[in-house]
Structure formats: structure tokens, C-alpha cells
Amino acid sequence: MKAAKKASKSTKTVGQDMPIERQHQCSSAGVVRESQTSSLGASTEKKELDEKLEKLLYFIDNGNGKFFSTLVTEERQRLTTQARIMREYSDILADRIAAF
């Protein structure tokens, strides 16, 4: 039985075991499709990140700022650092999207 499985595996064509997305990379049309998929993924990721960043900034600066000011200094610094890095990440995603 094991020999039959080995034989069937050896008859597969190159790339057949690859995920569909990877198989498409091998053709020029696949490269375009992959680029479009990457752009769409980056756009979705940026949108979700920006929504989270907006909520965090609201928590830090606006109506909920009263609670933020009661946090220990170290936690306020961590949240402020997180917001800064999220902004930088969002800017990088914007650059990647623009490059597509």
C-alpha cells in the first residue's frame, strides 16, 4: 500500500503540491494577480489598523482621557508608544499601497 502511495506522488507534475496562490506565481498573469492580492491585503490591513489607532487616540486624548490620566505613568507611556508605532506602521502600509 505504501508503495502505491509513493508511486502516485511521483507521477504528479511539478507545482501540483503547491497552494494555488504559489502556482499562479509561476506565470506572468499569476504575478499580476499576486500583486493585486497583496495590494488588497495591505489596504484591508491599513483600514483595520487605522480604525484601531483612531480608537486608541480617542482613549488617550478625548472623552475617555479622564481614565487615561488615572493610569500609572508607565502604562500611559506604553499606550503612547503603541499609538506612535501604529501610526508609523500605517504610514509604511500607505507607502506599500502607493507602490502597487
Image (cartoon, grey):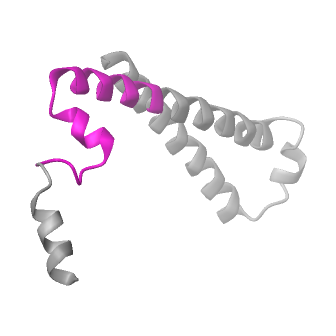
Q: Quick one: quadrant of the N terminus? A: bottom left
Q: Is residue 32 left or right of residue 51?
A: left
Q: Is residue 50 left or right of residue 40?
A: right
Q: Position of residue 58 (x, y in %)?
A: 78, 36
Q: Position of residue 60 (x, y in %)?
A: 75, 43
Whether the magenta-drawn stretch holds residue 81 is answered as no
Q: Residue at x 43, y 30 (%)?
A: 93
Please report the bounds of the magenta region as a residue range: 14-41
Residue toward you, 10 or 23: 10
Q: Residue at x 30, y 18 (%)?
A: 99
Q: Is residue 61 left or right of residue 53?
A: right
Quarter occupied by residue 63: top right
Residue toward you, 6 or 59: 6
Q: Is residue 5 above or below residue 54?
A: below
Q: Residue at x 17, y 65 (%)?
A: 8
Residue toward you, 12 or 71: 12
Q: Is residue 4 above or below residue 94?
A: below
Secondary structure mostly taken by the magenta-highlighted segment of the chain: helix
Quarter occupied by residue 70: bottom right
Q: Residue furthest bottom?
A: 1
